[in-house]
Image (cartoon, rainbow, N blue to C red):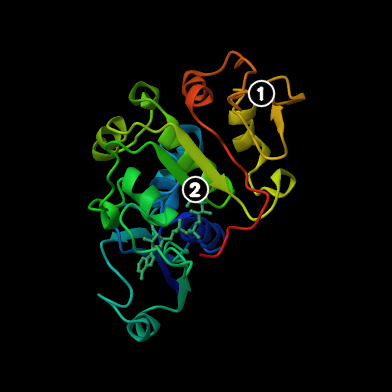
Amino acid sequence: MSLTVAIIGAGPSGLYCAEAIARKRPDAHIDVIERLPMPYGLVRYGVAPDHQGTKVVTRVFDRLLQKPGLRFLGGVELGRDIALAELGEDYDAVVLACGASVDRRLGIPGEDRSNVFGSAAFVGWYNAHPDFADLPVEMGGVRSVAVIGNGNVAIDVVRVLAKTPAEFAGSDIVAHARAALATSNVRHIHILGRRGPHQIAMTPKELAEFAVSNALVRSCGRKTCRRGSARPIRRCAKSGKQTSPPCAASPSLRRMTGRSAFIFASTPFPAR
Ligand SMILES: Cc1cc2nc3c(=O)[nH]c(=O)nc-3n(C[C@H](O)[C@H](O)[C@H](O)COP(=O)(O)OP(=O)(O)OC[C@H]3O[C@@H](n4cnc5c(N)ncnc54)[C@H](O)[C@@H]3O)c2cc1C
């Protein structure tokens, strides 16, 4: 008798799981059930729009979804359209691969103010996630942004905020976000982290996008130049302004080095 499997969630976990089952049991009937109309999960709605190379994996998923015995059922939400108990009656096995797409609230005062968003919502907004198309992002006149957390998602957000409209060429950023970001006037982006630069959670590849472009990393009074050497930041004794000339940089980073400060806070985010 052939095996019937329901996989909930068409992100990488669900799809790789489907692939593994199909390889082991070519006779299996696999239904991949997804609440959104499109598959790929956070590869589509999370991975940054200017990282098209990472999104290439969707081609592998496309080929997989065309395999006989495998069905993609989009727009079906477990818990809303179908109950787990029902699936248990209809399938031999049910796999839950629903991801973790909801922001964790910080529980701090000010969290509900306008223009304060969790990264899942903000990233979803610029990545065409249907749940966040109406996120009330007000970019007009915004000059300064604080990004709390210093992992890869933080650095994605910083890069997207800092890019000029032209620099989104070749990306798949959604039109409403591109238009809104074009109205911003961002000069300063502060990255607030619990610990110092040695403990940041960004991976070298993501960080290198900044390092080679000579982004200013101000934390312990040193500046990292594109050659990887660290030099003390020179400041004007009168104004306190930085006097080190910016090196050649990519357009986006040149824009930022001229105007922005990247601060990996070495002290904990103060309680208010
Ligand atoms: C901003 C951001 C950038 C990232 N950049 C990278 C990167 O550059 N490189 C990299 O390797 N990884 C990156 N990641 C991580 C990567 O996207 C995740 O690790 C991966 O998508 C997790 O896969 P998953 O299948 O577990 O979950 P998800 O991708 O979240 O997929 C879960 C799926 O389940 C669906 N679902 C949820 N609940 C239900 C329900 N009740 N009924 C039906 N369907 C449901 C969701 O709609 C979703 O499609 C990034 C993540 C984020 C947030």
Name the residue: 72% across, 19% down.
Answer: 227
Q: Position of residue 124 (x, y in %)?
A: 36, 50
Q: Is residue 228 left or right of residue 183?
A: right
Residue 48 percent coordinates (x, y): 45, 40
Amino acid identity at mark 2: Val
Instruction: State how far apart marks 1 and 2 are (Cα).
Output: 30 Å
Q: Is residue 230 above or below residue 27?
A: above
Q: Tag 2, which secondary structure?
A: strand
**Viewer-side residue, 255 vs 187:** 187
Residue marked by disc 1: 237
Q: Is residue 171 left or right of residue 226?
A: left
Q: Is residue 57 visible?
A: no
On whether ligand 1 comes within 8 Å of the CB at mark 1, the answer is no
**For discs 1 and 2, the disc positioned in front in the rendered view:** 1
Q: Residue at x 35, y 34 (%)?
A: 172
Q: Is residue 175 above or below residue 132?
A: above
Question: Which one is in front, 81 or 129?
Answer: 129
Q: Which residue is mark 2?
A: 147
Query: Could you tell which of marks 1 and 2 lies nearer the N-terminus?
Result: 2
Q: Secondary structure at mark 1?
A: loop
Q: Residue furthest front?
A: 238
User: Which circle marks residue 183 in the picture?
Assistant: none
User: Which quarter of the figure is the N terminus placed in?
Assistant: bottom left
- What amino acid type should be assigned to the residue bearing mark 1? Ala
Pinpoint residue 110: horizontal percent, then vertical percent. Answer: 40, 63
